[in-house]
Image: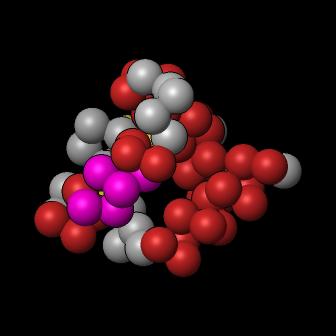
Amino acid sequence: MDKKNKDVLHHVNHTHREFDKETMKKIWQMGLARYYEVAIDEVDMENWTIKGEPMEDITINSIREVVRALKG
């Protein structure tokens, strides 16, 4: 994961302190799965890949899109 993606993920983690790190990871894994329209187990949060392919750059705007996907 490049520095930009780590910075964004760091920002997300600090804006949701009421959740522990593993819960946040699961929430984002679900949101990314919906956003990219793939199965949850195809989203690898450790290696930042989807179906083995690197995720496109995650930005603040795409985080908003993932949040919208989470809300359904």
Q: Is residue 14 above or below residue 36?
A: above
Asked if residue 8 lies left or right of residue 12, the reply is left
- Decide which of 41, 14 is in the foreground and name it: 14
Asked if residue 5 lies left or right of residue 1, the reply is right
Instruction: Mark yes or no: residue 15 visible.
Output: yes
Return the x and y of residue 3 as percentages of the image width and height.
15, 65
Q: Is residue 34 above or below residue 46?
A: below
Principal secondary structure, stretch drawn in magenta: helix
Return the x and y of residue 46 as percentages of the image width and height.
27, 37
Name the quadrant of the N terminus: bottom left
Applied colour scheme: secondary structure
Q: Which residues are the magenta region?
A: 7-12
Q: How many marks?
A: 0
Residue at the image position 72 percent from the left and 48 percent from the top: 70
- Decide which of 72, 7 is in the foreground and name it: 7
Return the x and y of residue 34 as percentages of the image width and height.
68, 50
- Decide which of 10, 34 is in the foreground and name it: 10
Q: Is residue 9 magenta?
A: yes
Residue at the image position 65 percent from the left and 67 percent from the top: 65
Looking at this view, name the residue that lies furthest to the left. Answer: 3
Instruction: Mark yes or no: residue 42 visible.
Output: no
Looking at this view, name the residue that lies furthest to the right. Answer: 72
Residue at the image position 43 percent from the left and 22 percent from the top: 20
Q: Is residue 65 above or below residue 28?
A: below
Residue at the image position 57 percent from the left and 35 percent from the top: 27
Return the x and y of residue 57 as percentages of the image width and height.
35, 73
